Amino acid sequence: MSVPPAFELDDVHFAYPDGHAALDGFSLRVEDGERVAVLGPNGAGKSTFCLHLNGILTPQQGSVRVCGEPVDRKTLQEVRRRVGVVFQDPDDMLFMPTVAQDVGFGPANLGLSKEEIRVRVEGALAMVGMSGAGERPPHYLSFGQRKRVATATVLSMEPDVLVLDEPSSNLDPRGRREFGEILGSLRQTLVMVTHDLPYALQLCDRAVIIDAGRVVTDGPIRDVLVDDELLQAHDLELPVGFHPDAIWAARARP
Amino acid sequence: MGGTHGGADLESVAAGHSPVHRLDPRVKIVGLIGLVVVAVTTPTGAWLVFASVLAALFVLAAAARLPPLHVVRRMNVEIPFLLAAAILPFTAEDGVRLAITVGAKITIGVLAMIILSSTTPFPRLLQGFAALRAPALLLGIVSFMWRYLHVLADEVARMKTAREARGYSASWIWQAASGGPLIATLFLRALGRGERVYLAMLSRGYAGSIPEGLEVPLTLRRSDVFFLAGLAAMLVVARVVLP
């Protein structure tokens, strides 16, 4: 049997209680190991899409499958282990008194033994370059460090899919680069919801533009980002004077 | 972004290294609460007991190398209580003895809690209370409050800065009116924050209770036993023999 897709949304509809249709016939299939940038204007349904991937929200119509399994009450905990979501503001994710307790929160919910949890915590902190920070309270860390620890809290659950909501927001240039290097070193399927087009180009191979609750464009990221007309139509812009091929060339170097 | 609110100072003192800092949090909690209980149950006018308990606290504070100014500043919280006790000489029989006794009891209680909180990092303090079987729900609430007070305090600091940058100064009485919107904004932000934190918890498999045993385990060492035994002996002598 071939490897099932990392996730697959099929004709998903979702409206909030105020009647706003956030997802309106949303379909997207991402294969195992892909790196996908999800782009789109504010209010396009990006966050709603993220919350469907780990079953926080469930479609009112259509279906969501993660690693071949439908997302329902029975598979919910397993889906949340498989799909790790890194929220935009690390302070939303770091709620325990110390870094180590926070990184161990997910594994403990999975029912792992103390020894396994310890190994997972150390491993996840090492992956984000924060070894040795375990006993520190989160508010003693810089924003960039908190972002990395927030990512570790998800990595410690050994997810198959990593979903990042605006990974580069509020990071200073150095923090942005360091975080990009960490993301580049991970082997998980990566879904990155962002406005930062150069960052997306640097880290992803495929780009999906969503607007008004559905996928409007899906293709190789370089092809999508050189299409000025397409970008403009969906309120997306590259920084002034920036050409995608500059990053593309930098990426190609070993 | 650290912010310069009151908590940072307490935490840097609590992160110090001294024999008192190194004691097991359970031992400090039991010992200092025991000491307060002894002081509170001591009858009026038993000056020797109060003096010896206070002396014990001074020895602890000195051994912990707590900055005197830090301790004195934190003692401020007892001023309203001392003022209340100061009414006693005018209202009660033998009021002066009573007022001094009440004052001594308050001072001992406050000083004991200052020493506890200034020598134990907050996560260890929570862990100590959890190990002593304090209700998990209560500790959970305190833990979240402590974590997000820092976040909220930073938000308040930023909002105040933004207000001042637009010509606000707190020196005019009519400007006090803008305190209301600030509190309202803060409330709404806290509400939104709470929802996002809950989503983040669900995303990591939260199913109704905070998992236990994530802390570095506590171990009782010889110094902990000595401390507790010594303090207990001293308290028994003070409470039983001296009055």
Image (cartoon, rainbow, N blue to C red):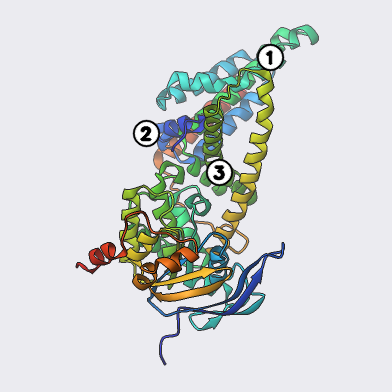
Q: Amino acid at mark 3?
A: Tyr
Q: Amino acid at mark 2?
A: His
Q: Is residue B178 above or below residue A214?
A: above
Using the rendered image of the protein, determine whether residue A34 is visible from the camera's viewpoint: yes
The quarter of the image holding the C terminus of chain A is bottom left
The chain identifier of the residue carrying mark 3 reads B
Q: Nearer the viewer, mark 3 or mark 2?
A: 3
B218 lies left or right of B108: left
Q: Secondary structure at mark 2?
A: loop
| Residue at the spot of label 3 | B148
CB-based contact (under 8 Å), mark 1 and mark 2: no
Residue at 47%, 74% in the rendered image:
A217
| Residue at the spot of label 1 | B83
CB-based contact (under 8 Å), mark 3 and mark 2: no
| Residue at the spot of label 2 | B17
Camera-nearest residue between A127 and A5 = A5
Q: Nearer the viewer, mark 1 or mark 2?
A: 1
Q: Nearer the viewer, mark 1 or mark 3?
A: 3
Q: Position of residue B165 (x, y in %)?
A: 52, 28
